[in-house]
Amino acid sequence: MPFINIKVLKGTLTEEKKSEMITRVTEVVAEIEARPSPKERLQRNTWCIIEEVDFGSWGIGGVAVTPEMLKASIEGKK
């Protein structure tokens, strides 16, 4: 039974987006892992957790990510 652990920066996903991510990621993982059987056999036993990490606790390139950095990255400015 698969266990999926997704980490995101706190406050970046709405409850609706979290729900959609759980549903879609679970479907894809179950589809791939269950082959050649139908994904539905594995899907109901696939765990998916979304963990939210505080901005000061997430870094890239030796620098803690800020909300401004994330926004610039999403907008393609960095």
Image (cartoon, rainbow, N blue to C red):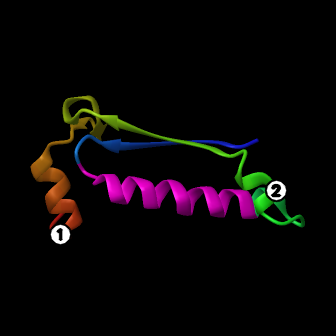
Q: Quadrant of residue 51?
A: top left
Q: Tag 1 or tag 2, which sits nearer the N-term?
A: 2
Give the vertical position of 6 relative to 29 (above or below).
above
Q: Identity of the amino acid at label 2?
A: Arg
Q: Which residue is mark 1?
A: 75
Is residue 74 found left or right of 72 in the rendered image? right
Question: Where in the figure is residue 66, as x and y percent of width and height?
Answer: 14, 43
Q: Residue furthest right?
A: 36
Question: Where in the figure is residue 78, as x and y percent of width and height?
Answer: 19, 62
Q: Which residue is mark 2?
A: 41
Give the vertical position of 70 relative to 8 (above or below).
below
Q: Quadrant of residue 20?
A: bottom left
Whether 28 is among the magenta residues is yes
Q: Front-most of 16 and 10?
A: 16
The structure residue drawn at horizontal position 36% and vertical position 59%, both measured from the top left corner, is 17
Neighbourhood count class around disc 1 (C-alpha, 10 Å): few under 14, some 14–19, many 20 upward? few
Q: Which mark is residue 8?
A: none
Question: Where in the figure is residue 50, as x and y percent of width and height?
Answer: 44, 42
The structure residue drawn at horizontal position 71% and vertical position 50%, both measured from the top left corner, is 44
**Magenta portion: prevailing SS class:** helix
Q: Secondary structure at mark 1?
A: loop
**Mark nearer the viewer, 2 or 1:** 2
Q: Secondary structure at mark 2?
A: helix
Question: Where in the figure is residue 61, as x and y percent of width and height?
Answer: 29, 42
Specify start and end residues of the magenta stretch as a single range.
12-31
The structure residue drawn at horizontal position 72% and vertical position 57%, both measured from the top left corner, is 30
Please count the marks in the image. 2
Q: Front-most of 19 and 60?
A: 19
Q: Quadrant of residue 14?
A: bottom left
Q: Residue furthest left?
A: 68
Is residue 72 found left or right of 52 in the rendered image? left
The structure residue drawn at horizontal position 76% and vertical position 61%, both measured from the top left corner, is 40
